[in-house]
Image (cartoon, rainbow, N blue to C red):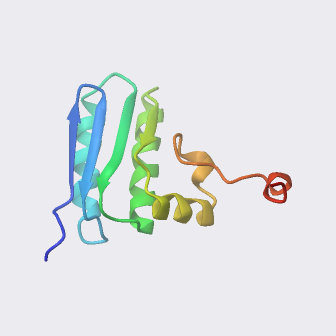
């Protein structure tokens, strides 16, 4: 079975990312997302629930979109973050830079039950 093609779509203030994202598809997807963000003036919710990938290129993509939006005084808030992608963001120390990603528990809270 072939993975679903990566797509990004804007509906109202929701940017929905779906399909399989890898190093071969990320550049085209980034350009498409850039255009959608540039065409919107509102803060956006980026819905990742339909995305089937947890890869470092996805984190790079999201950070690029966030930088673009921030430069336009827009806010991106990420929802539908998979456990694997959240874990990858935490391992990379990026979870606190992506609003909506679960943040790592502080060391003092990790030892409490």
At 42% from the left and 29% from the top, the residue drawn is 72
- Tell me the quadrant of the picture where the N terminus can be found: bottom left
Position of 14 with respect to 43 (left or right) is left
Position of 60 with respect to 53 (left or right) is right
**On the image, which quarter does residue 87 sit in?**
bottom right
**On the image, which quarter does residue 61 sit in?**
bottom left
- Tell me the quadrant of the picture where the C terminus can be found: bottom right
**On the image, which quarter does residue 19 sit in?**
bottom left
At 39% from the left and 45% from the top, the residue drawn is 65
Q: Nearer the viewer, residue 84 or 6?
A: 84
Q: Position of residue 101 (x, y in %)?
A: 53, 47
Task: Reply above or below: 95 against 10.
Answer: below
The extreme top residue here reads 42
All told, the count of numbered labels is: 0
Task: Reply above or below: 34 against 59.
Answer: above
Q: Position of residue 22 (x, y in %)?
A: 30, 70
Q: Position of residue 24 (x, y in %)?
A: 25, 71
């Amino acid at each position: 079975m072939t993975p679903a093609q990566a797509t990004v779509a804007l509906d109202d203030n929701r940017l929905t990312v779906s399909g399989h994202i890898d190093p071969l598809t990320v550049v085209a997807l980034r350009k498409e997302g850039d255009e959608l963000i540039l065409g919107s003036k509102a803060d956006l919710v980026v819905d990742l629930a339909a995305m089937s990938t947890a890869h470092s290129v996805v984190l790079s993509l999201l950070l690029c979109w966030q930088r673009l939006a921030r430069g336009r005084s827009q806010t991106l808030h990420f929802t539908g973050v998979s456990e694997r992608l959240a874990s990858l963001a935490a391992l990379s120390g990026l979870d606190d830079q992506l609003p909506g990603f679960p943040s790592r528990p502080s060391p003092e809270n990790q030892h409490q039950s």
